[in-house]
Structures are given as structure tokens and as C-alpha cells.
Image (cartoon, coloured by chain):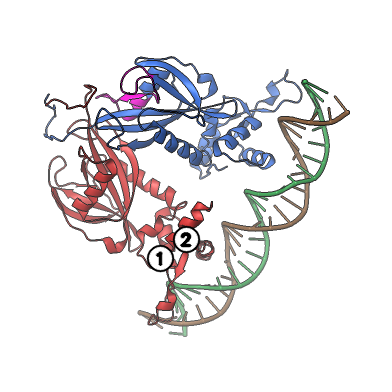
Chain colours: A blue, B red, C green, D brown
DNA sequence: CCAAAAGTGTTACCGTTACACCCATGG
DNA sequence: CCATGGGTGTAACGGTAACACTTTTGG
């Protein structure tokens, strides 16, 4: 096979390039990660992140979006590039570079469908003893660190909760992700003082009188505040 | 040419993969970036970051280190992965993915040597009107944002100053990178209160009586503090 | 001699911390 | 009826911001 180029020839060895997606979810006070069971070699039968080879006419991000759709039936979710892994031995098939992304999904988006080359799709707690394919354990570690670092300075935690949530929900999420206890009262004050939550408790006519108030995150206001120098911090 | 694989065949189109290095320096109260003048097509004669195609037997980081050495004569400097760029039209030769790194160099390391395929190497102020090859202007923007974000939470500013420096030097650096004025007194207090600077003013026997005190950054102490939960912030 | 630079001191203010406390409910 | 969980209040503390001020030097 000869490489088809337009104007300038270059004959360098070309590594294969894949995209892998670390998909986080939050359920029952646990941080979860979505894994697919491989139906092909290598690592047949092992669990791995959704991902695959990048096509000629798509960007890495497009590829990630396509894989999310194809292998897990997910769309319209938070997605961000994580890191590019290029260790020589990370894939037994030879030289394969992986551009890793991480995604955050809300519980209602949990419509799981096993796709092509996939035997099954399942959520796992990140603390479970996972035995992942390739170097995916290392990728997972990097992704968790990124999430821990970013959740304090950007309102990405809301991407892991339903559209409407309670303050105890949010508090729980932060304690779980950051792996430390956070004072309830202070957390509440800090979050509310930002004025970024919309109160929906008036619509809860039939709610049991002692239930927690329901809020949603005000993306529009957040964008406006950001543009005028505000910056989120928990 | 047939692709040589070990055990499993996969015949996906393979993009070419390059590594590009955004190299920052600091001189005369200006943030600088190191560029090389291209001696080959495409973009012959234009300025671009040091970089090139990744080899079969090297990781992306190895490639970046090699390019720093080959094209700019630099070694033993701060280096970190920045982002991977994969826009379809970013290279006129066809599908080329670039794994970008950014590096920080101290002034004394400014030993510039033009390497292979390079016509010249020069420092430019990041505020100059640069007309860069490929999508390097976009890469530069991402790199500057990363630097601005990271310098406040990790002691990477010291990587841009000589081993020994004064507090006004450091203050200047922060004001320049962050593009805003910072109160002298408060900055000084905050930095000194961390206890991470080693005072070398006793060795300045012949210094003019009114010169600024000379310090160096205590990497050992920083590492120890970090491991016990401390975290740097300016 | 005066402007500029290095370094120090002072104060008001504000956000965080670490609590204690209230209230309503449901088992 | 009381343990539980949602929600509120408060006082001490510590760091930050915004200054003023001193000293020394170099032009």
C-alpha cells in the first residue's frame, strides 16, 4: 500500500491511533465508570473503555462522540480531552497511540446498548477491583485525578446529577468524588451564595413536607458571570 | 508497503502523527516563545514550533525531548503534554495529528542551535504579531492559557527564571504572565510565608547595598510539603 | 535632590471553619 | 417518640486587599 498524499511526500512509519472514552456516572453515592466487554481480540472478554480506531475523515473529538453513540448509546453529554497515551507496549498489536477523553453522564442518560464488537456494557464502581484491558487502569487513574481536580474549579459536578437535584445530592457527590467529608452547612452556604441554583421547590406541591428542596443549575447565569470575571470554586 | 503487525491484523487508515513543542521563556519582562524557521515545505520560510514526526520506537514525550535537543539544543527542562490537535485541515499534506507539549526554559539555557531542516531559531514575544505555520497560532493560544492557569497552582514560574532570582523578578514574571498588576507587598508576603525560598543574600558581599535580595526555590522542601498535603497557590 | 525601587507595616474586611441548634418526619 | 436528615445561625479565626510608609540609590 502506498500512502496517498496531496503535494508533499513523507514516508514516516505511522502509528495506529485510537480514541478511548472514560465515562463517569454517579449512582447510589458511588462514582461509576462505564465499561464494555470486548468481543474481539486482543483482550477478548476483558472489560475496557468504549473506543476504537480513528477514521480518516473525523477529528478525535468526533471519533469520541461516535464511539459514545455506537458503543453505549450516549449523546449530548459532557466530553473533554484527557490525555494522549503513547507507551510503546500499551497495545499487544503493535504501536498504537490512544487519545483519551473523559465524559460525564447524568443518570437519566443511562440507556445502555451493547454495540458492534461489544459483548456487554455495564457500570462499575471505580473502587471495584477492575481488571482492565490495555493500559486502561492507568488511563482511569489519570481520569479520576482530572475529575477530582476539575470539579472544584468548574461546575462539572452538575453533569453527573439529574437536571433537578437537591443540595444533599450535590453534597454527597462532592464528598464522594473528593474522597473527604465536607461540612454540610458551609457547603450549602458556599454553593447558594454563588446564586447559580434555580429553586424549583414551589412546584413540589405534593412533596412530603420535609423533603429537600429541588434545584437546577443555571447555565445561562453561569456563562454570564464567567464572562464578567467570576470563577467557580468549591 | 504492507503494515507489519505482530499477532492481530487491523487495516485502518493511519493518520500521520507529529509532536510539537511550545517553548516558553521569560526575558526583559516579556513572555517569549521559541520558534524555528522552516527550511522545507510545507510552510517553507514560515515560523513554527520545533517538532516533527514521531518515530516507531519512541513515546510522544521521548519525541518531544528529542526535538528539543535536535532543533533547539535544549535539555533538562520542564516539559508537559498540552493537548492533541486533530483538525482535518490543520496540515496541507493530509491527515496529520499533532500531540503538543509545552516547555519552560530558564534564561541560561538559551543555547540556540538551528538543527536539521531548520533555517533559524529565534525567540519571539508572545504578543508580537506572529504569522505561524499550520495551526500553531491556535496551539500557542491553548499553551498560554494553560500556563496562565497552572502558574497560580504549581510552582512552575521558577522554571522561567534563573536558578537565583529576586522577589521583584518573580513579581514581574507573575504580572507579565497573568496580565494584571499584583500588589507588591501582598505578593511578597504570600510567597515568603510559604517558606519555599532559600535566601542567598548573605553571599552577596559585593552587592550594592540597595539591591534586591537573592533567592532560590527550595525544590526539596516543596516536595516534602506537597506529600504532606500542602498545595501551592499564588 | 528627587524619582524610583526594595522592603515593611497596618488596618479593615471578608470568607472560611467549626460548631451548635432547630424543625419536621417517619419508622 | 426519638433518631434521622434537612436546614439555619454564629462566633472565632485567618488570610487578603488596599494602603501608607521608610530607606537607599542612581540619574
Using residue A230 as the reference point, say whether residue A35 is left or right of it.
Answer: left
What's the chain of the residue with tag 1? B
Q: Is residue A39 magenta?
A: yes
Residue A8 at x, y = what percent?
11, 34
Segment colored magenta: A38-64
Q: Residue at x 55, y 43 (%)?
A: A233
Residue B75 at x, y = what percent?
26, 55
Q: Residue at x 27, y 61 (%)?
A: B109
Name the residue that disc number 1 marks.
B169
Q: Residue at x 33, y 28 (%)?
A: A19
Q: Residues within 10 Å of mark 1 (few under 14, many from 20)?
A: some
Residue B215 at x, y = what percent?
43, 69
Q: Place residue B82 in its image quadrant.
A: top left
Mark 2 lies on a secondary structure that is: helix
Q: Earlier in the sequence, mark 2 or mark 1?
A: 1
Tell which of B116 and B25 is nearer to you.
B116
Residue A78 at x, y = what percent?
46, 29
Share a chain, discs 2 and 1? yes
Label drawn at residue A201 = none
Name the residue that disc number 2 marks.
B221
Looking at the image, how many numbered discs can be counted on the residues?
A: 2
Quadrant of the drawing holding the N terminus of chain A: top left
Amino acid at each position: 500500500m502506498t500512502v496517498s498524499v496531496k503535494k508533499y511526500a513523507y514516508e514516516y512509519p505511522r502509528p495506529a491511533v485510537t480514541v478511548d472514552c472514560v465515562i463517569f456516572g454517579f449512582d447510589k453515592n458511588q462514582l461509576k465508570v462505564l465499561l464494555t466487554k470486548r468481543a474481539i481480540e486482543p483482550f477478548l472478554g476483558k472489560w475496557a473503555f468504549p473506543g476504537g480506531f480513528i477514521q480518516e475523515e473525523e477529528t478525535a473529538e468526533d471519533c469520541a462522540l461516535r464511539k459514545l453513540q455506537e458503543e453505549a448509546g450516549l449523546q449530548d453529554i459532557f466530553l473533554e480531552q484527557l490525555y494522549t497515551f503513547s507507551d510503546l507496549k500499551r497495545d499487544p498489536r503493535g504501536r498504537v497511540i490512544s487519545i483519551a477523553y473523559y465524559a460525564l453522564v447524568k443518570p437519566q442518560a443511562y440507556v445502555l446498548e451493547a454495540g458492534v464488537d461489544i459483548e456487554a456494557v455495564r457500570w462499575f464502581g471505580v473502587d471495584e477491583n477492575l481488571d482492565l484491558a490495555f493500559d486502561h487502569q492507568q488511563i482511569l487513574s489519570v481520569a479520576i485525578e482530572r475529575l477530582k481536580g476539575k470539579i472544584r474549579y468548574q461546575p462539572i459536578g452538575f453533569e453527573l446529577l439529574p437536571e433537578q437535584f437537591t443540595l444533599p445530592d450535590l453534597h454527597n457527590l462532592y464528598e464522594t468524588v473528593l474522597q473527604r467529608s465536607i461540612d454540610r452547612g458551609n457547603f450549602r452556604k458556599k454553593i447558594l451564595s454563588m446564586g447559580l441554583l434555580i429553586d424549583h421547590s414551589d412546584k413540589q406541591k405534593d412533596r412530603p413536607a420535609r423533603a429537600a428542596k429541588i434545584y437546577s443549575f443555571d447555565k445561562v447565569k453561569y456563562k454570564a458571570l464567567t464572562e464578567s470575571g467570576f470563577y467557580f470554586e468549591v
